[in-house]
Image (tube, grey):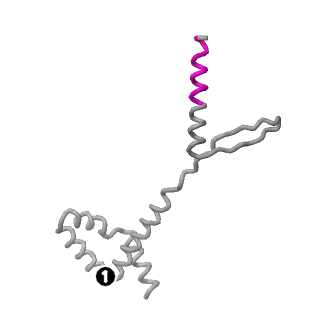
Amino acid sequence: MGEHIGEFRSRLSRLDRKYKGMASGGYDAKLRSDGLIVITPRKVKRRMALLPIAVFLLGFVAFKGFLLLSLGPTSYDERVARLQEGSSVEQVGAFVMQSDPLSKLLAEQMGSVLQ
């Protein structure tokens, strides 16, 4: 009996994982060709978290491009420089709002389309 205890414990841990999976994500029951009903836990589908982040970043860069277009590059840079002289929160805002090549490119493209 002692030599089979490892196999027994591994089977118990497999069953425990199976039941925890069924409790969290549900289960599917399938009828095999020999008439046996086999119940398996459903695979949990992970939601795509990168897409909303990418949409947010693209919208933010487009917003910066629109500000660059409407204020002009010199006025925009002056306002960011004023932010850098402020509190620590304003300095973080200045770092985030500094003009980058992608924002400048979008401002140029929007300027050619809007004018």
Query: Which picture quadrant has residue 37?
Result: top right
Q: From the viewer's perspective, is residue 57 above or below residue 64?
A: above
| Relative side of 85 to 94, left or right | left
Q: Amino acid at mark 1?
A: Leu
| Rendered residue at 60%/21% (across/down) | 8
Magenta stretch bounds: 2-14
Residue 1 spot, x, y in % from top left = 61, 11
Q: Main secondary structure of the magenta part?
A: helix
| Rendered residue at 43%/66% (across/down) | 56
Residue 46 spot, x, y in % from top left = 54, 51
Residue 9 spot, x, y in % from top left = 57, 22
| Rendered residue at 59%/30% (across/down) | 14
Toward the front, the furthest residue is 23
115 is within the stretch colored magenta: no
Q: Which element is circle 1 on?
A: helix
Query: Which picture quadrant has residue 108?
Result: bottom left
List the residue tagged with mark 1: 71
Q: From the viewer's perspective, is residue 78 above or below residue 87?
A: below
Camera-nearest residue between 43 and 50: 43
